[in-house]
Amino acid sequence: MNSIKNNRLKNIDALRGICVLLVFFTHLSITSWFVGRVGVAAFFLVSGYVIPFSLQEAKGARSVIYFWVKRFFRLWPAYWLSIIIAIILMTPIASEISIKGILLNITMLQGFFGVENVIPVYWTLQIELCFYFLICMLLFFGYSKNEKYCTAFIVFFIVVYFSMALSRYYMGIKFPVAIPIAMGLMFFSAICRIRRINGQELPIFLGALLLISLVPTCLFAYADITKPGEGGAYYIVAYFLAFFIFIFFEKIKKVPEVLVFLGSISYSFYLLHELVIFFVRKYFLEMTAPLEFFGVLLITIFVSWLSFFFIENPAQSFGRKILNSLKNRYPVILGGNYTQL
């Protein structure tokens, strides 16, 4: 735990730790999908809170390039490791996917080409990439931390996801409503960070508008889901819980160090936990439920720490060296806060 950098936002890291555990519990079949949905929605709120602020005030093409250099060395190395492990373990998807599918998965863009994810959790990364592209657009013009533009995006995405929900309900067109919902959540948390930096109150009215808009959206979009424990009402509760959990952790100062530690390794944990579950259930079939839970959890924490220590940290250090070299050659105002996803 001592390796965690002092410039990290510990309360946000702790929230990451909570999020990844919620997703883990769902995939281990300890809880329903609903709990995992809370974790995923809160993850999106975390991304909006930190990603636009990984660079200080800057604009132009160079800033966009520097942004992607940081994101590349933050995301892709550990992501590639998870693909390699999935192929070695011959998970059901990895054993059937084509070479073309593997190559597209390597890019992290497979979802945009209708190709199946080697590991199911990758779907959230593609939503993250959509947010990155929008942030880069704002960054290019110097508006990535401008509350008015973030608010405009929120209003735009409210209109988009509500329209999609109506289309799903009345026309049966399965629009991916989760994408604009996630965009709205991320831009809302970006405004929360802007307000926090400026010493202002959180945007209560905007948050209320966002939550209220999600009620009819979820009821219309998921009206066709009749499976017990699912459906629009459960999505509403999940988004509301994620929202209030985020607000709670955004405000608190002291958090358990164990959650901070889990948050620091949460990206590798998120990528690898399904592989650990698959491995344990394939080779240790006779384990009792409590033993399986603690065994899978401890193994996942251990392999995630290994990935963090030997893959994530070195990759990000190398990325920082490249950034420093670029800054020396092409000066631009850059931030030194390498807050992680």
Image (cartoon, grey):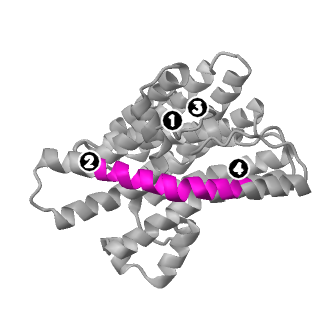
Q: Are marks 1 and 3 in contact (CB under 8 Å)?
A: yes
84 w.r.t. 31: above or below: below
Residue type highlighted by circle 1: Asp
Q: State the residue position of label 4.
A: 134
Query: Which label's residue is closer to the chain start, 4 or 1?
Result: 1
Q: Quadrant of residue 206?
A: top right
Front tag of 2 and 3: 3
When asked about the image quadrant of residue 17, the answer is top left
Residue sticking out furthest to the bottom: 99
Question: Residue 273 in the image: x percent, y percent?
Answer: 35, 54
**If you read the primary sequence from the N terminus, does the residue marked by circle 2 or circle 3 appear first?**
3
Q: Which mark is residue 13?
A: 1
Q: Earlier in the sequence, mark 4 or mark 3?
A: 3
Taking the image as shown, residue 296 lies to the left or right of residue 13, namely: left
Q: Amino acid at mark 4?
A: Leu
Q: CA distance from mark 4 to mark 1?
A: 24 Å
Nearer the observer, 286 or 240: 286
Q: Is residue 306 magenta?
A: yes
Q: Residues within 10 Å of mark 2 (few under 14, many from 20)?
A: few
